[in-house]
Amino acid sequence: MDDRQFRNAMGKFATGVTVVAAEVDGRVHGMTANAFMSVSLNPKLVVVSIAEKAQMLEKIKQSWAFSVNILAANQQDLSMIFAGQVKNNQEVAFDHLDGVPVVPNALAQISCKVSATHEEGDHTLFIGKVTDIQVNDSEPLIYYSGKYRSLAED
Ligand code: FAD
């Protein structure tokens, strides 16, 4: 099985899109991620999977805290910026939730402290203990088969 076949198969899993954010020495670093899921209700835990080559890996290890921001349909531009798909020379402004940087107007802002890490293959799983949540009501950004989508109208 080659990498392309694996990627194609994984791309058939339609997901939302998140931006993971962490702050080190007053500088916020954001990264687009869809390898995100809820892990446990009691205690409230989530997980994100970060590539070993991603700068975000060291940022989370240094700050030991991160946020997961579920993007709204009108935030595709932010997804592209934080995936490095478009060049952006301007700092993006972040709000803070429980001391952790969060993306303004995201569908959900979830602040976490690192509870555990697990290295597997070329990624590290960060289990986050959820410390606070802010939810907004609008439509989600969807990612499927390597393309951005939106939910179809009824
Ligand atoms: P960089 O590549 O250096 O940064 C990413 C971009 O964000 C750069 O252009 C940088 O300028 C910009 N940026 C960062 N902080 C700021 C700021 N404060 N203000 C303005 N711009 C800023 N990778 C994974 O490891 N796990 C995943 O689950 C995952 N899911 C993905 C899902 C989708 C839909 C897409 C498109 C990509 C996904 N990726 C995932 C790939 C990942 O987003 C990219 O490889 C990303 O470039 C890695 O970021 P980095 O931390 O290495 O930092």
Image: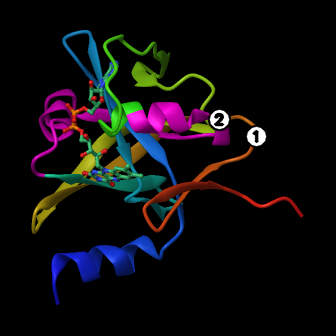
Specify whether residue 66 is painted magenta: yes
Look at 21% across and 27% down and name the residue there.
63
- In the image, residue 141 sits, relative to residue 134, either above or below, namely below
Q: Is residue 50 left or right of residue 66?
A: left
Vertical arrangement, residue 108 with respect to residue 28, above or below: below
Query: Do labels 1 and 2 touch, CB within 8 Å?
Result: yes
Residue 101, position as x, y percentages in the image: 41, 22
Q: Quadrant of the N terminus?
A: bottom left
Magenta-colored stretch includes residue 111: no
Q: Residues within 10 Å of mark 2 (few under 14, many from 20)?
A: some
Q: Which residues are magenta?
A: 52-80
**Rendered image quadrant of residue 133:** top right
Q: Which residue is mark 2?
A: 74
Q: Residue at x 45, y 12 (%)?
A: 93
Q: Is residue 15 above or below residue 102?
A: below
Residue shown at 46% from the left, 16% from the top? 94
